[in-house]
Amino acid sequence: MNIKMIATDLDQTLIRSDDSISSFTINTLNTCKQRDILIVFATARTESDCKSFKDAINPDAIISSRGLFVRAGENTISRSTLNIETTNKILKAYLRHSNIRYVLAFTDKGRYTNIPIDEHNTIWGKCNPDMYTNFSKGLDCEAYDIVAEIFDDVTADIMADSFPTIDVKRISGQHWFSFGAKDVNKSVNKLDGIKSLAAYFNINLEDIVAFGDDFCDVEMLRDCGIGVAVNNAIDEAKSAADFICDSNNDDGVARWIEERIL
């Protein structure tokens, strides 16, 4: 096994359900870096929402917002955005549907939401503070991702049909959907980010191991050299993976690395 890069999801994969990361996991990843194995975060979070884990581990690269933004150190490798006109058309379409609750627009200015967020709520505590707006006047900037909590698939299908040139996908086993940019009419995902980094670092895809748990991890679990799903992953992720490791709360990623790579 000649692994040169480890690409790992964060939530429910590398980090525990209480949003912590164990010293064992940190030490294991640091050992990998000492052995010249690149560490990459591949997450649905924005890069700013990864700050505490970035500070703890100092990854070589971050694939954020499901692959829409890829950075290695200070170098931006790829970035996909929705123009201002498209951004505002999507946001205004959301306002017409009662089965849509939270709407979040991710921009270079920060994250906007249509409902004020309680920063003390454990669901949102891991995220940076949001800027509240009802979106009725739109935004004055591009968005690289728009995420909505949609409570029924019919409404999700209506929204998807309304924007056929936009990449619409379910990003969670619950009710969360993402509306992001496409690259030449092709969906952008974490695997695309990994491929961009593989080219940047001159690494073969077969020399990369990916860890994940959810819908937006399926492509990288399936197509990287080795795909490993945590035990708490959804069935679709497990089916795409080559191996199943222990759960995120049992440091499954780090233990698999220690046993199989180090």
Image (cartoon, rainbow, N blue to C red):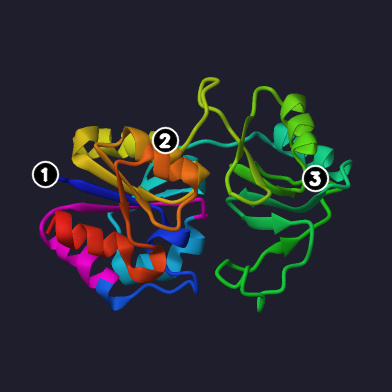
Residue range (magenta): 25-46
Circle 1: element type? loop
| Quarter the N terminus occupies | top left
Total count of labels: 3
Q: Which residue is mark 2?
A: 219
Q: Which callout, 1 or 2, points at the residue further toward the start of the chain? A: 1
Going by the numbered disc 3, the residue's amino acid type is: Gly
Instruction: Find the distance from the CA under tag 2 to the CA under tag 3.
Output: 33 Å
Q: Is residue 51 left or right of residue 102?
A: left
Residue 188 highlighted magenta (yes or no): no
What residue is rendered at 77% in x and 66% in y?
116
Task: Determine crowd level at label 3: few under 14, some 14-19, many 20+ residues with C-alpha closer than 10 A.
Answer: some
Q: Earlier in the sequence, mark 2 or mark 3?
A: 3
Asked if the magenta segment contains residue 27, the reply would be yes
Q: Badge 2 local density, few (<14 within 10 Å), some, or many (20+)?
A: some
Check contact, mark 1 vs mark 2: CB within 8 A.
no
Question: Secondary structure under badge 3?
Answer: loop
Q: Residue at x 70, y 56 (%)?
A: 112
Give the residue displayed 30% in from the left and 39% down from the top: 197
Kind of element beneath mark 2:
helix
Give the label on residue 1, or none: 1
Tell me the residue that label 3 is attached to: 138
- Asked whether 187 or 262 is in front, the reply is 262
Up/down of 77 relative to 57, above or below: above
